[in-house]
Image (cartoon, coloured by chain):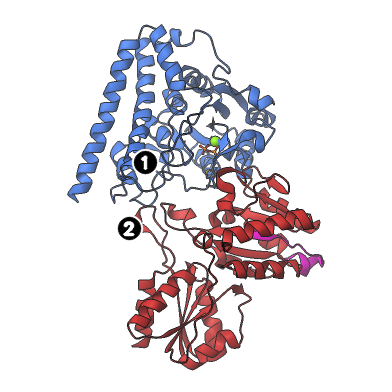
Chain colours: A red, B blue
Amino acid sequence: MDLTVADTIREIIRGHIAENDGVVLGQCLSAVGWIQNTIPAQTEGLIELPMTDVAGAGMAVGMAVAGRRPIFVIRYQSFLWLNSSPIVNYAAKCKEIWGYSCPVFVRAIADEGNGLGPVHSNCYHSIFMHMPGLPVCAPMTPGEYRQIWDWYMTHDDPLFVSEHRRCFRSAEELPDIVSDRSVFTIYAASAARFTAREAVRMLAEQGIVCDLVNVLWLKPFELSERTLAPLRRTGKGLMLDSAYEVAGAARSIAYELMDATGARVRALGMADRSPGASRHLENGTPTPERIAAAVKEMLT
Amino acid sequence: MMSRDLRRPDLGAIPGLAATWPEARTLELFRRLCEIRHFDLRVRRGQIEKDVDTLIYLSVGQESVAAGVSMAMRGSWLLGQHRGHSFYLAFDGRREPLVDELLGLPTGCCGGMGGSPPIHDIERRIVGHIGLIGDQVPVAAGIAMARPGERVVSVFGDGAAEEDYVLATLGMAASRKLPILFVCEDNDLSVLTPTRDRREWLLADVARGFGIEAVDIADDPWLVAHWAETLSDRLPAVMNVRTCRGLWHVGTGSDDNADWDRFALVRETLAELGLADKAAAIESETEKGVEELWTSRLRTRSAK
Ligand SMILES: Cc1ncc(C[n+]2csc(CCOP(=O)(O)OP(=O)(O)O)c2C)c(N)n1
Ligand SMILES: [Mg+2]
């Protein structure tokens, strides 16, 4: 059977501990399903942190300075509001200020809905893109996860990995969908990769053919033939993301796309309000319906 | 290990304490305990029957901590944590907005935004928790500084006790002699990770290091009430109360492996005091009261 994203992460970590003297730090690593089966069920190489949501990140940073290439696990991205300072102020600035590196691999897991409520139902990677010295990516497939891991192991930068629980059980690779017949180009990151595919299907049924270009790297955003050529052809685009739209990754990348091509690109993300725990108050990744409506509005 | 030896139902026991209480006070204590228990068991049923679909954090097994503390501190400011129905009820938060919140109604105390963790009743000085563990503790200190002369109860778990900002707040409370009763509901678990896998130190020792009076006791409700009352004149103070979570961290499941069953022990004590019949009557009254409350709120919901 094909490995899922969760299997892939777990096997990468197992190898990292066994072969690289790597180490994982986090809270409740062993309990309740080993973080959705993304942590190998072993004691070796795992450091069970107490509930130190500020100092914990600092400890991971220290291990990175000392060369252990630590993986720092954040079970819900909401905890990052407490953990962020050592990551953005220490790890990300290390090279610029002191010339030595601090390669900490931050596994920040987003989730939404399921009654999680106003703080934990969310995806907060945009605020990390704001700070220099910290590349930000959002792998959603097994292959992409291996790709960003290889990048991390061959560079000496910290890496912010915005994971999403929606992809953990998926074994699918999600290739770009590009066609000469397209009239519109959709870009998608994080869990919006899944809703975007559904939207593309829905729109195709209505005779509206759209490209779907995957965004793995949020920062730096990949300005290449792969990302730009479809937009140059269709002249209209929409960038989707699972985080807040206002001042968020989607708008920032939409701007880069517009700036590079002159085409009109809009952004869609979470609405500007806190998600509620009750179902009717949820607020998350743009749904296929919202995406399809936004595309149609831009085409009229 | 030291902290394991301290996990016993008679930790800090004062022999004969319950017998020194007037009957009416003992029965009131038991009434509060029962209401919490039946309320949370009703929430549990509500989730099983799919009337409650948000995340719920129940205090079944831990009722006596809130009931005991409330006997001395009701009317103070209260800042609880995510597992907070017990303290909300014991501090007399209004019932209907609580049930409505769990049912996801606009008339809920948070308009359906939060489910269990952020419940509040600000008019009764019960302040909401945002869902980041322990961050209610520095907020409690802020309230204490803003309202000189008013007492504050700050509740958190044994996991939260490890948070940087919780420890820093103990220091601030010590330095400024803030009138805060810190209550740690020590169920020996952070989700499913036991204390021994997380730390080697004791909260009471740390508090004493800061110069704060601290007790480390089991959750006998008479004992909890006794210390809450004794310490209420000597704040700041810390009560680390050893208790047992009867259900899963979140939701309705049960592992049936609690170190002790406090509710059963309380019933035994009441029987020894000759109060078995009165206690049984209180149990069925509170259960009935809770059921009536839920039935009426569910009726309101289906009428909408
Ligand atoms: C700042 C923060 N870190 C981690 C979590 C995840 N989390 C939710 S409840 C919990 C356990 C808290 O343990 P404790 O304080 O002992 O309370 P209990 O659940 O035992 O009542 C954890 C780790 C969180 N909600 N907030
Ligand atoms: Mg606990």
> Which residue bears the numbered disc 2?
A280
Q: Position of residue A90 (x, y in %)?
A: 72, 60
Q: Position of residue B108 (x, y in %)?
A: 31, 46
Q: Is residue A157 left or right of residue A76?
A: right
Could you say which is closer to the camera, residue B118 or residue B148?
Answer: B118
Q: Visible in this render: residue A246?
A: no
Q: Amino acid at mark 2?
A: His
Q: Is residue A96 magenta?
A: yes
Q: Position of residue A183 (x, y in %)?
A: 42, 89
Q: Residues within 10 Å of mark 2 (few under 14, many from 20)?
A: few
Q: Which chain's residue wears label 1?
A: B
Magenta extent: A93-106
Could you say which is closer to the camera, residue A249 or residue B139?
Answer: A249
> Which residue bears the numbered disc 1?
B121
Q: Are tags 2 and 1 found on a single chain?
A: no
User: Residue at horizontal 43%, vertical 27%?
Assistant: B63
Q: Which quadrant would the N terminus of chain B be assigned to in this image?
A: top right
